[in-house]
Structures are given as structure tokens and as C-alpha cells.
Amino acid sequence: MARSDEPGAASVEAVLRQRVDELEARVALLEGVVEAIPDPLFVKDAGHRIILVNRHTEALVQRARAEMLGRTDAELFPAEQVEGFWEEDDRVLRGEADVSERLEQLQDADGALHLISTRKALGHDPRGEPLVVGTIRDVSEAHRRLDAQAARARTTAVLLERLTESFPMGIALFDADGTLALATGPDLRRMGLTPERLAGEPLEGLAPLWPEVVEMVRGALRGAVSARTLQWRGVERFVTVSPVYAADGAMAGATLISQDRSQQQAMEHRLAVLERMDSLGRLAGGVAHDLNNLLSIMLMGTSALRDALAAEDVPAAAAHAALLERSIDRGSRLSRQLVAFARRQVGPPAIVDVGRDLEAVRVFLGSLVDSEVDLRFTVPTEPMRVHLQPGQLEQVLIHLVGHAAQTAKAQVRVEVEGRRLDGDPELRPGEYVCLRVHDEGPALSQEARERLFEPFFDPDGRGGGMALATCYGIARQAGGRVRAIAGPDGGNLIEVLLPRTREQPLRGGEAPAPAPRTHGGVRVLLVEDDPVLREQVREFLQTAGHRVVACEDGMEARDWLEAQGFDVDVVVSDVVMPRWTGVDLAGFIEGRVPVVLMTGFIGDRDHDLPALARRFPILDKPVRPSLLLEAIARAVPAAD
């Protein structure tokens, strides 16, 4: 083993000593550079601990370097100042700003306040850990030299900057001669209109960037106020420009406020989605409750029916089968209410005289309410006609009067009148029939009135369900609206507006067409995507004597028809199916083969529902077997 005093060991020690000397020299150089920087300098780690300062920092805060190193701002400065320091530190550490610049207040060890301008940037130590590297400029003396007007302007700029940080807007101030005095806010910064770029810029300097604004500012300097929606690089901005007057009435300049409409629209869309999801959640819960009750009844009834059949008790089996049919009818009503709320009901509308139909159901409406409820009607003598599907007006009246009359010992007034709308933000200009139901019960809150027509919403214990939601769907599908407002004399007022028509209804007294004679032997192409339902309908039609070919969607049916040369008597098709819908298929074969459509919901496609119902017979699901046979017989009359 070599001894330390051997030439090789001495050589290694000399090399190490040289490297240490070089490192010490570099450290001394860096320390000299840090000390020579004319502004106060600091370095903090991710935990806000101070790990480096220079002599100018010591002089500014009136604290020795040893007192600051290893400590956080919270141990050295007032809490209200530290909050601002750390807020900017964290922004830098997250990489949200290449260089952060901010005006802040700093209290030194003697209690004196300094107005400082800090510049912070992200750095890293030799291990790669993030650091906040910053410099400070004490602008207190320069600030004190400003006169009162300049001081107010600077304070206003800072406040505007902080205010606009919370909103997607920008604010610009122009002097009386058109010089840009201030440009602040995130919206202008996104456009590149920063204070650094535009400070002192004359009005004409904006022309290459935003020429429309130049004309608006010129108008404001002449005393005009203007507001326009402008495009800037594909983004909509709502811009308002107004004149500013001095205390003596002289023109002082102009203000510009720019707001990014896309962010506002996105926020409104998110809020609408949240409200819609909340409404759908209540809808799903209410439907699940009612549907589970129906399924329970049907399961119990099915079990009882099976037992009765096993015991060959025909009367009991028939009774249980009738109970199952009533349960199916209840489920069908629930389905129709959901479809009405979704505004996807099918069938041609009729011309309905609201006043005449109201007179026809007055006695029935009176039987719905408690004897202590004073139910009054005001109906005009002139016709008040609207387009509605048969039975829809009665639905609306029953639901609204029933809801209003649940307030005990109250008066309920039902009124019908004509109304002209020209500037309504929701409805097209024109004539409307207004149906109002006014109760004198406890007034609902504004929030409850706004949500009253949501499915299963129950604001006051009157039993939230689908009734009022159904009224909403009927009114919207007819091109109108329904809303709840505060009654003029207290209580609550529900107002339904429906587009008025001057068309004459069909003459009454016409005998209905006789039901066709049901016959067998019809060649039926059945199109249904649900495999269980498809098989049940196929077996039922075959039992009735028809010949049936079944396809699972519209595209398969189209291919079969083309291959067979349309050799079929009638096509019975579901509407809502994958790939090709029943509407697509019906349009493809219209005029060559009769079509019967089955559905309870038309889907999200933009169909003209009344026109569709005039072209093809449409059966509401669940379809009664007798009605299906009748529809086939009407489509393919029996040969004499």
C-alpha cells in the first residue's frame, strides 16, 4: 500500500486542492456578482424559505442576513403582506408565468412601509428542485414624487388590474387627444394589447390591430356611446366605448371595455348542463319509483296468474290478466307524460278553441277540486283557436287546476284572453292565446317558480310529479311556453301562451269512418330492433293469420325489399332504430308499399311531427294488439 507522503498521493492531493480553490473562486465570484446587483435580490425554495439575499435586501428590510436565511416570509413580515407574496410565489412555482411582476407593500424591521416592485422567475437548484428567484425595486421615493392626480391614476390601474383578473374582460383608458393611457385585463392581454406594448400609443396605432375600435373611440371623444359585438381572430368580443368627462364638463377621454363572449357562453353552457343533469336526476328517480311500483304489481300479478292457471281457475286467471292490463295502461300513461315533457309526441294537431273546450270541461274541473275551493272562469266570447293534439288542452287544464286547487279554502281563477307579442325574447312575434290559472295560496319563492315545471320537483308539498312537466312539454311543442309568476294580488299565477290561429276547425257532426274489417293472409314486413318484442309481434301476427317476415333495422329491411322487388302488402316498422330509422325507411318506400309506424318517442332528429303523422299512421307504444290489427286492416283493406 502506498504511503500518503509518496509522490502519487501528493499529486492527487494537489489536484483536489486545485479544484477546491477553483470552486471557492467561482463561489466568491458568484457572491460578488450577487452583491454587485444594484437591486435587492432574494431566492426562496418551494417551502417559501429564504436561502439567499444580497446586501441591498438587508438594507431594504432593515434585517441582517443571518436573521433572514432559513426563515419564511411569515416569520418576518405582516400576515396581510405575506399572503400576496406567497400567492405570486406559487404562481411562479406552478409555471403559470415566465416572469411575474407585481407592485406590493413591504414593512421593514423598523415598521416603515415601502412600495416595492417585484420581478419573480422560476429557477432550480443543482438537484433540480424549483426555486423562486426575485429582484425588488423600492419605488417609494418615486411614488412620493408623483402629484395627487398621478397617484390616483396608479391606484386605479392596480385596482382595475386586480378586478379584471377575476373576469374575462379588458379595460382601456384614452386621453382627450386619443393617446392610450391604460390597457389592462386578461382579455386585452390575450389580444396582445398589453400596457408595455401600448403605453403612450396614439389612437391611430390601434388601426392595424383593431380598426373598428378606432372609429368607436373617435366617436366617444365626440360624446357618443357605442356598443358592438366584434370579431377578433375568430373570437366574439362585446365592446363598449363611452366618453369620460372632467368635473368641469370638459372632455377628459374615453373608456373601452372588452369582454370575451366565448368564455361567458361556455360558462352559461356549463351551468345549463348542470341544471339539466340535476333535472334529469330527479326525473330518473321519480320514474324509477313509479316504474318499480308497476313492475312489482306486474310480478305479483304474473305469479298469481300462473297459480290460477295451474289450478285451472279460469275466473281468477281472467281477473289477474285484467289487473296486468290495468298496470300496463298505467305504465303507458307514464310513458306518454315523459314523451310530452320531451316534446316528442307524435300525431297530427287539431284546431282547438280554448274557450269552447274550457266550457265543455268546466263541470269536470269542478269535480276535481274540494267543495271549499271557489273555482271561477273568465272566457271571452270570440274564438281563441290554437293547434294542439286531441286531449292535450284537457291535460293542461286538469294539471294546472288540480295543482292550484290543492291549496285548501282558496279561490282559483281560470282566465282566457288574446294577446299580441312583438318584443318577447322567447316567442316569435304574433298573436297568442293566454290561459291563466291563479290561486290565492302561499306565494312560491322565485327559485321555486323558476323550477316548478321540472319533473318531480315538489316546492311546497303539493306532490311533485310529471303533471306540470307535461304542461311544459305540451306548450313548448306547440310553439308556446308556460311559466309561473307572482300573482298581481298575491298568490301564484301560472300563464300558458299558445300561438293563435285564425283557421276554421273541421265541421262537426261528421260520422267517423267505420272500423275496417280485420282479415288474415296479409304479407307483413315487420321491422323492430328489440329482439324480444320483434318475436312477440311476429308470433301474434302469425297467430292472427298473417304471413310475416321480420328484420332488425331499417337498413336490413331496405335490402330485403330491394331483393324481393317490394313484394309485400304492408310494412310495420318501429321509428327509433340504429342505422336507418323507421322514418328513413318509410320515406324510401313511400308510394310503393303502405307503412304503419310504431313509437312513443320520435328521437332527437329534427322531424316535422305533424307532417309525419299526416303521411303515415303512427301507433303509440305500448301498442294494443287490437289496434295493430286494425291499422294493418286499414292499410290493406280486405278484398270484397
Image (cartoon, rainbow, N blue to C red):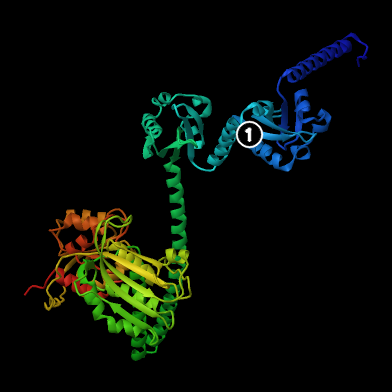
Residue 404 lies in quadrant: bottom left
Front-lying residue, 138 or 268? 138
Question: Considering the image in quadrants, where does the N terminus appear?
Answer: top right
Count of all numbered marks drawn on residues in the image: 1
Most extreme residue toward the top, as rendered?
A: 7
Most extreme residue toward the left, as rendered?
A: 640
Residue 121 lies in quadrant: top right
**Residue 464 spot, x, y in % from top left:** 44, 72
The kind of secondary structure element at disc 1 is: helix
> Is 394 situated above or below 474?
below
Front-lying residue, 339 or 520? 339
Residue at position x 47%, y 24% from top?
A: 201
**Residue 338 spot, x, y in % from top left:** 36, 67
Q: Which residue is mark 1?
A: 92
> Is 512 situated above or below 4?
below
Front-lying residue, 311 or 226? 226
Residue 600 lies in quadrant: bottom left
**Residue 140 spot, x, y in % from top left:** 68, 29
Front-lying residue, 102 or 586? 102
Q: Is residue 87 left or right of residue 595?
A: right
Question: Considering the image in quadrants, where does the C terminus appear?
Answer: bottom left
**Residue 222 spot, x, y in % from top left:** 38, 33
Amino acid at the residue labelled 1:
Val
Residue 331 seen anywhere in this rendered image of the structure: no
> Is 326 situated above or below 259?
below
Q: Is residue 426 left or right of residue 172?
A: left
Q: Mark 1 Cα within 10 Å, few/some/many (few <14, many 20+)?
A: many
